[in-house]
Amino acid sequence: MNDKLTDLTRRLAVSGALSREEYEYLIVNRTPDVAQSLAHAALSVRERIYGRDVYVRGLIEISNICRNDCLYCGIRRSNKNVCRYRLEPRDILACCDEGYDLGFRTFVLQGGEDGFYTDGLLCDLICDIKTAHPDCAVTLSLGERSRESYAALKSAGADRYLLRHETASPEHYASLHPAQMSFSARMACLYDLKDLGYQVGCGFMVGSPGQTPAHIARDLEFIAEFKPDMCGIGPFIPQRDTPFGTEPAGTLELTCYLLSVIRLICPNVLLPATTALGTIDPFGREKGILAGANVVMPNLSPPSARKKYALYDNKISDGAESAQSKAELVRRMDAIGFRVVTARGDIIK
């Protein structure tokens, strides 16, 4: 490790802040020794705040119908090879009931931007979930909606909202999305959510087509400025029926490296070891936790729907990421010295 890398690593661990140019240098010149040093610092910070607890969220993929046509996404509107589905409110409530019996105290409702889920329907659904399980948190990940919509859902009882910014570069954003979608609209949604009092999650794909170290440095700078409560990053994995179907996937190595960096930038952040990590490596989730992550999201969706929510190829949909296999997840986390907890797991300020 050269003197500059040593200095940057030390300053990031102490202050949690570097310049955009310094983040880029840290990415371009990373080595296994730097990664190990950052992971060690990230684990120390995470343990100071959260101990060795790993929070689990029950993920319910409510629909793979989407009005958008993002170039990287397997459920994009133009993909005619997708077997479409949507869950009715009664199905979603049944998933929550099952998850509650399994010990889950946070439910994440994720889906494409499907017009079926009006504000009225979602508000009634959130109220029903909260009535049945008042000690639980409800997280939504349903894409871009109006400020008025976000406000209504918050009033109905939604606690958190996940909306990946995808990239903090307007030019890179434009290369990943159709012309009808705009970088400014995505950012406006994130700031609306924060202003309305949600616990807000942003995030980006690691290794997305056209991404450069400068783009990632800009993402890190944005995360430092926005101060999200949650941050979801995962490796880009191509889906065969998209325009990016033959592009190379992102790497476990860089994703874990960035998990460590993000933990140091935002010490309190709720940081998932994503399903995508588990897809590209059998021990990807464990490696993410060892890099500084502290959240996993097992799948509570009906088994018939899991493989249909194919954002990318070969997405794992049964096994340790399945909520019913919680005992296996507990065993795997225990094997690396961590403890699965099923509390609401709010951010610790």
Image (cartoon, rainbow, N blue to C red):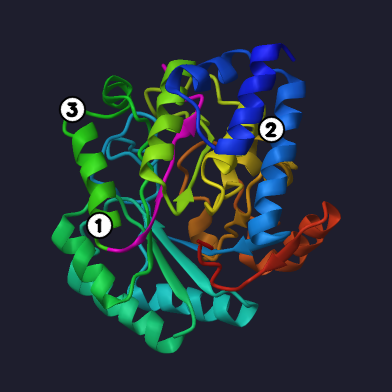
Give the quarter of the figure containing the N terminus: top right
- When asked about the image quadrant of residue 86, the answer is bottom left
The residue drawn where x is 81% and y is 61% is 331
Residue 265 position in % (x across, y down): 53, 39
The residues tagged by marks 1 and 3 sit, at their Cα atoms, a distance apart of: 27 Å
Q: Say which amino acid is labelled 2.
A: Leu
Left or right: where 192 falls relative to 275: left
The residue drawn where x is 18% and y is 73% is 120
Magenta region includes residue 198: yes
Left or right: where 275 falls relative to 96: right
First along the sequence among labels 2 and 1: 2
Label 1, secondary structure: give it. Answer: helix
Label 2, secondary structure: give it. Answer: helix
Residue 319 seen in this snapshot:
no
Between residues 110 and 261, which one lies in front from this camera angle?
261
Magenta region includes residue 306: no
Q: Say which amino acid is labelled 3.
A: Ala
Residue 230 position in % (x across, y down): 47, 52
Label 3, secondary structure: give it. Answer: loop
